[in-house]
Image (spheres, rainbow, N blue to C red):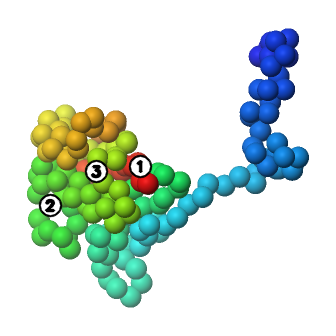
Amino acid sequence: MKRRNMLKSLGLLPLAGAAALPLDAQAGKKRKKCDWSPKKQLIRKSWTGGNNNPSVAPSGTGKVPASVVTGCLRSGHLLFVAGIGGWYADRRKEPGDIRVQIRSALDIMKEVLEEAGSSMANVLKVHMTVAEPNQNLPALNEVYRAYFPDPPPVRSYTGCGVDQMGRDGILVQIDCIAYVD
């Protein structure tokens, strides 16, 4: 309320109010607050209904290929890629160590981004869930740095125990937001 009174006293309220309204409301159309929804385009569907647990296969197939486990949505100029695990049995028999798994996850990320018309250079933010981060982050970082040109994307991670990764063998899962023209 103080801000509104200050803007009013400066004669800026009509200007500030108009700038805050959606264009259709400025043109005289009333719009309900709940009418807005983001524009989304499915680029790659997760066969697991958002669960991204490869043990849940599409009915009748018995197997979820890693290339379709990862979901990707486009909204405007942004791509949202989620659920890339470090190991899928249909891609590699053994889980491997953290170096092998982050390389595998980043290769899948690159594949998904290129399929959507983007690239690793356009990745803006990365989030990872890392099993035993105190043990695995130094080796993960060595591999990770080679995948992104300068400046690298901003990054965050969540650490957990290996028994909390959703299925045995997984050491890393990665999500990202990237720009696309």
179 over 91 or under it: above or below: above
Residue named by callout 2: 95
Q: In which quarter of the image is the C terminus?
A: bottom left
Using the image, determine if residue 45 lies above or below residue 108: below
Of residues 178 and 172, the one nearer the viewer is 178
* Helix, strand or loop for disc 2: loop
Q: What element carries label 3?
A: helix
Residue on which the image places disc 1: 179
Q: How far apart are marks 2 and 3 (CA)?
A: 24 Å
Q: How many labels does the image show?
A: 3
Quadrant location of residue 132?
top left
Residue at the image position 12 percent from the left and 70 percent from the top = 93
Q: Which of marks 3 and 1 is nearer the N terminus?
A: 3
Task: Please name the amino acid that badge 3 sits on.
Answer: Met
- Mark 3 crowdedness (10 Å alpha carbons): few <14, some 14-19, many ≥20: many
Circle 1 SS class: strand
Q: How far apart are marks 1 and 2 (CA)?
A: 31 Å
- The first of marks 1 and 2 along the sequence is 2
Extreme-bottom residue of the structure: 60
Q: Position of residue 33 (x, y in %)?
A: 78, 47
- The quadrant in which residue 85 appears is bottom left
Taking the image as drawn, is residue 130 in sight?
yes
- Which residue is labeled 3 in the image? 120
- Image coords of residue 49 (percent x, y): 47, 69
- Residue at 47% over, 51% down: 78
Q: Which of 5 and 143 is in front in this view?
A: 5
